[in-house]
Amino acid sequence: MEAREIKLLLNKFYEGVTTSEEENTLRGYFKTEVNIPEELEDDKLLFSELSEYKEESLPDFDLEKDLVAVIEQQETKVIRFKKARFWTLRIAASIFILFATYFFVDKYVAPPSNSTPEMSPEMAYLETKKALLYVSQKLNGGTEELKNLQKLTESLENLSKLKEFDKATNMVKSQNR
């Protein structure tokens, strides 16, 4: 075989497009040929190393079966985890409710104590006066709008005077006829 053909086969080999027959041709060339050009010495070394290693047969894998087994295993782990998390959350919520109830009842629903300070009658009078004054101010604040209503009432009184004037003019008209 010529060196030119070997170089073409080597190019195909390095590109990864050789057939097994072409690779066997290259192995046979580098194994049997004595006068190999100097530029192909590295390739000869490579093929001699490759020929030392026997092709290892890979075990027959059933990839689909393995994937299904892994997926089923993961699903059972997820289901167990979800169930455990569900029960854990229930227990935590129950504990939270118990603590919240305890603290709420302790703080806000304490028994009434009779420890209110005693007030003197003068003090009670002043507090009552203060509260009533506050209520009075709030009620009087709403009466400002009633001033406009008072103006309307005055205008209506003026209209009643017009009504009397209208009656008088009607009487004069009826007498003139």
Image (tube, rainbow, N blue to C red):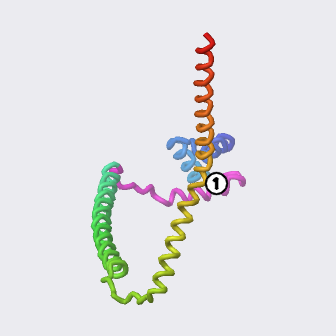
Please state if 108 lies on the left or on the right of 139 as rendered.
left
Q: How many labels does the image show?
A: 1
**Residue sitting nearer the eye, 67 or 96:** 96
Q: Which residue lies furthest to the top in this view?
A: 177
In the figure, 119 relative to 74: above or below? below
The residue lying at 50 percent from left, 43 percent from top is 20
Please state if 91 lies on the left or on the right of 20 as rendered.
left
Residue 54 belongs to magenta span: yes
Residue 31, percent from left and from top: 56, 53
Q: In which quarter of the image is the N terminus?
A: top right
Residue 22, percent from left and from top: 54, 42
Estimate how packed mark 1 is, as few (under 14), some (14 to 19) or many (20 or more) residues with alpha carbons within 10 Å.
some
Residue 92 can be seen in this image: yes
**Residue sitting nearer the eye, 144 or 102:** 144
Residue 85, percent from left and from top: 32, 66
**Residue sitting nearer the eye, 91 or 106:** 106
Q: Name the residue under label 1.
A: 43
Instruction: Locate residue 92: give its quadrant.
Output: bottom left
Residue 61 belongs to magenta span: yes
Q: In which quarter of the image is the C terminus?
A: top right
Part of the protein shown in magenta: 34-63
The residue lying at 34 percent from left, 75 percent from top is 100
Residue 1 can be seen in this image: no
In the figure, 2 relative to 167: above or below? below
Question: Under tag 1, what secondary structure?
Answer: helix
Instruction: Locate residue 105: give its quadrant.
Output: bottom left
The residue lying at 60 percent from left, 57 percent from top is 46
Residue 142, percent from left and from top: 56, 56
Q: Which residue lies furthest to the front in this view?
A: 175
The residue lying at 47 percent from left, 81 percent from top is 125
**Residue sitting nearer the eye, 71 or 164:** 164
